[in-house]
Amino acid sequence: QGRGALHLVFIPSAGMGHLLPFSRFIGSLASQGNVDISVVTALPTVSEAESEHFAALFAAFPAIRRIDFNLLPLDDATLAGTDPFVLRWESLRRSAHLLGPLIAGATPRASALVTDVTLASQVIPIAKKELHLPCHILFISCATMLSFLAYFPTYLDGANADHLAGDVDIPGIGRIPVDYPPNVLRNPDSLFTKQFIANGREIAEVDGILVNTFDALEPEALAALRDGKVVPGFPPVYAVGPLKSSATDKEAAHGGASSPIAWLGEQPARSVVYVAFGNRNAAALDQIREIGAGLEASGSRFLWVVKTTVVDRDDTAELKDVLGDGYLERVQGRGLVTKEWVDQEAVLRHPAVGLYLSHCGWNSVTESAAYGVPMLAWPTLGDQRLIAKVIKSGGFGLWVEHWSWDGGEGSLVRGAEIAEKVKEVMGDEAVSARAREISLEATKAVAEGGSSHRSMQEFLATLS
Ligand code: BUP
């Protein structure tokens, strides 16, 4: 890594879905050289996966500086029971005033900040008023979600409301049904709602927004944002995706991935269903067992990552207890089930994988799109239903909208239905063809002269 005039300071947030796109972006920038990079790091992290990822990132790129960020204790009884990741965002936000002096002391002098959106309302004023530096956001969800976040304050003002109370008609995007955005926004008292509104109100003050998407994946949302239809005078939006691990960053991804990949190597092309619902989806035991039954009944080969807790450190359950007696023996040879972190990018890139049954985290979707793997969308929470809409309109997957994760009688999704849908998408030629097309578009976008490559150059040009 060279010692150029540019010094970018990155401020990532908590959760692998937030950290991974930052490390991918940082990795590709570091590999180009000529840019000094610092990363604000709050340790210990919430999850083990994040700790390992930070350690591997700094090991892979020794020239990257670590700015240790010691968080103030979050002593607030009213927050009991809040999701541990949202709670960490709040800790970061309430300690953000410490960032000014920390970054002011950096050498060489910082040229710009790149922050996660969860900290936007705190970091933007510090960058502008205290440090007098340009500030950008690296937005880790889709452009459609960015439109929603940016427009939400206008919606609230128009409806004279302090929470999501109905469908939202976003200019240039169209009507978003009330049950697509994060459900928790219907509760004005939730911490997430307060953070979301504060960040949405501040976002237009930023100098630019980098988004992990590409023009061919979300043409309408990107056009609406860039044309100022969503919010007049909105900052420049740089679609720089799909972000991928750079060669060196591969080491920064997780080790121990060899066995699922080796197993995939023994399976026929496009025969395996990859099943993963993200890093922190604490699925109910009875729903996990229905998924197991569905995969078994589908007749397909499958690679299934099972998680039962919100934070990985708490996950002590034995697979055989989770799946029930005899399950692993019955599917042996055609189904591989693991509780370990897998190198998902390597899985989705593997020619044996023919379908991804997914929670629709945006990073996961961009990975599936990049490698042309059709999707069966089963969103869990947060932005994931809005993302499922992107998959559906993109035509590279199927979304069974009534599938929920509420659990309990009536809303449990039965194995027979899961098996039927898996077979349906596996056999859907139109969806496969569209997935291949999207993957070609993704490759073109990041290649020299492609839309994402050009956006990246434009972004860097604004800094020099
Ligand atoms: Br699980 C898992 N290996 O075993 P999203 C996830 N990932 O590489 P969101 C692995 O984590 P949550 C694993 O490839 C993706 O890049 C995956 O981000 C990777 O999910 C990332 O898809 C997860 O945006 O939920 O919504 O942040 O944090 O629960 O995964």
Image: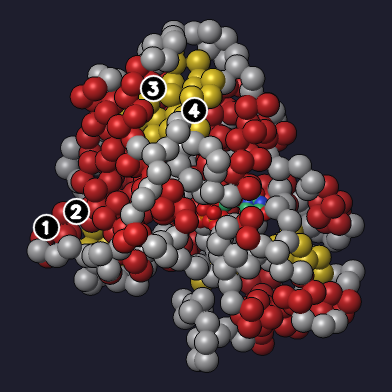
Height in image: 48 above or below 463? below
- Which numbered disc flags the more N-terminal residue, 1 or 4? 4
Q: Can the viewer see residue 306?
A: yes
Disc 1 residue type (three-letter): Asp
Pointer 2: residues within 10 angstroms few (<14), some, or many (20+)? many
Residue 105: image location, x then y, percent: 39, 14
Q: CA distance from mark 1 to mark 4?
A: 39 Å
Residue at the spot of label 4: 68
The residues tagged by marks 3 and 2 sit, at their Cα atoms, a distance apart of: 31 Å
Q: Which residue is mark 3?
A: 102
Kindly indicate whether the residue at mark 3 contacts the one at mark 4 (C-beta within 8 angstroms): no
The vertical placement of 450 against 160, above or below, is above
* Residue 157 badge: 1
- Work out whether residue 99 or residue 115 is closer to the camera in this orientation and state it: 99
Q: Amino acid at mark 2?
A: Pro
Identify the residue at image location x=31%, y=58%.
191
Cα separation, mark 2 vs mark 4, equals 33 Å
Residue ID for mark 2: 153
The amino acid beneath tag 3 is Leu
Callout 2 touching callout 4 (CB < 8 Å): no
Q: Residues within 10 Å of mark 4 (few under 14, many from 20)?
A: few
Query: Which image quarter holds the C terminus?
Result: top left
Q: Earlier in the sequence, mark 4 or mark 3?
A: 4
Question: Residue at horizontal 21%, vertical 46%?
Answer: 201
Q: Earlier in the sequence, mark 2 or mark 4?
A: 4
1 and 2 marks in contact (CB < 8 Å): yes
